[in-house]
Image (spheres, helix red, strand yellow):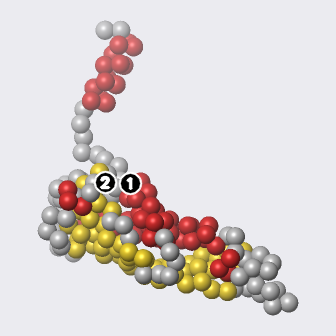
Amino acid sequence: MTRPSRFAAALALLLTSGCAWHAGLAVPEGARTICIEFAENETRLPDFEIDFTNALHRATLDRVDLDVVGRASADLVMEARLVDLRRRGGIRSAEAELLEGGVTVAVAVDLVDGRTGEVVAHSERGLAAGFVVGPGRSPATAVDEPEARTRVLHNLADGVVLDLFAPLSYNRGPSEPPDGP
């Protein structure tokens, strides 16, 4: 064999040989699919659940190797609630004009075994972000508030996915999990 053909054969062997390595966070034993339920919205902001559900989809697909399916065929189900949304005023100018505001969002998410109905993991998180209000505006009409809410939702979704799946990764090594503390 010539040198390039040996290299090609070695590369083909390397690419086709299987190993147990995979990217992403660990999932419960036997889980291959997940359903990300449409989040419940307990806040007074209409359609806020759409943004959070989309953020959960993105965060889950980025970090966990599961296929997203409907609830009836899901091994795992993610059930989310937007618990709270608060706006706050912030810094004011010497003329008492509001210059900065903020939003705080709280969420609660359960990871449920779709086969047994048992809650496998739970996450509750809250996060705040500030934004510029601008002259003559209130926090509710500030141009930058939607962007601040989006930043908060994406950070919360990332944190929730880590809360739900990272403990499984820490508890499972390349072989059997260790016994005892």
Foreground: 65 or 108?
Answer: 108
Left-right relation of 110 to 145? left
Q: Quadrant of residue 18?
A: top left
Q: Residue furthest right?
A: 95
Q: Do we see residue 51 in this rendering? A: yes
Q: Earlier in the sequence, mark 2 or mark 1?
A: 1
146 shown above or below 29:
below
In front: mark 2 or mark 1?
A: 2
Left-right relation of 114 to 23? left
Q: Residue furthest top?
A: 1
The amino acid on which the numbered mark 1 sits, given as a three-letter code, is Leu
Give the x, y percent position of residue 34. 27, 58
The amino acid on which the numbered mark 2 sits, given as a three-letter code, is Val
**Residue ID for mark 1:** 61
**Residue ID for mark 2:** 68
Task: Say if mark 2 contacts mark 1, CB within 8 Å.
Answer: yes
| Helix, strand or loop under label 1 | helix
